[in-house]
Image (spheres, rainbow, N blue to C red):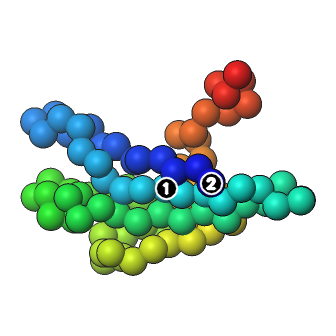
Amino acid sequence: MIELAVIAVLDDAGELHAGDLVFADPDAHGRYAGEFRYTETWLAHPRRFALDPESLPLALGRGIVRSNNLRPPLAAFDDALPDRWGLH
C-alpha cells in the first residue's frame, strides 16, 4: 500500500496538509484501487478550496472518493505523481 500526503501551498499560510491519497498494491493485471479524503485541518481552513472542483468538491467533506488507476474522479492527481523516469 502507498500512502501520500497531499500538500497545498498557500502564500500566507505556508504548506497545509489538504488530504490523503492511498493506493492498494497492483493486482495481477497491474490495476490498483485508490482513494482520497480531505483532512479536517483543510476543511476548517478559511482559505480552503476544492483541489478539483468537478471531481473533489468541498461538499464531499469527510467522505472518501474511490477510483481505479487514477481514473476520474482521482485523475486530478495523475500528472502530479512521479512518472516512470521520476521513480528511478
Residue 31 spot, x, y in % from top left: 79, 60
Q: Say which of 70 and 28 sits in front.
A: 28
Left or right: where 41 falls relative to 8 = left
Report the mark closest to the observer, 1 or 2.
2
- At 59% from the left and 50% from the top, the residue drawn is 2
Residue 55 spot, x, y in % from top left: 48, 68
Residue 3 spot, x, y in % from top left: 51, 51
Kindly identify which numbered label has been placed on residue 21. 1
Q: Quadrant of residue 56?
A: bottom left
Crowding at dot 1, Cα within 10 Å, few <14 / some 14-19 / many 20+, comes out as some
Q: Quadrant of residue 12?
A: top left
- At 71% from the left and 56% from the top, the residue drawn is 25
Q: Amino acid at mark 2?
A: Met
Left or right: where 23 falls relative to 41 = right
Residue 57 spot, x, y in % from top left: 36, 70
Q: Amino acid at mark 1?
A: Leu
- At 41% from the left and 47% from the top, the residue drawn is 5
Q: What is the spatial separation of the Cα atoms under label 1 and label 2, in whole angstroms?
A: 11 Å
Residue, disc 2: 1
For numbered disc 1, what is the local secondary structure? strand
Is residue 71 something that shows in the picture? no
Crowding at dot 2, Cα within 10 Å, few <14 / some 14-19 / many 20+, comes out as few
Q: Say which of 11 and 86 sits in front.
A: 86
For numbered disc 2, what is the local secondary structure? loop
Q: Dots 1 and 2: beta carbons under 8 Å?
A: no
Left or right: where 46 falls relative to 26 = left
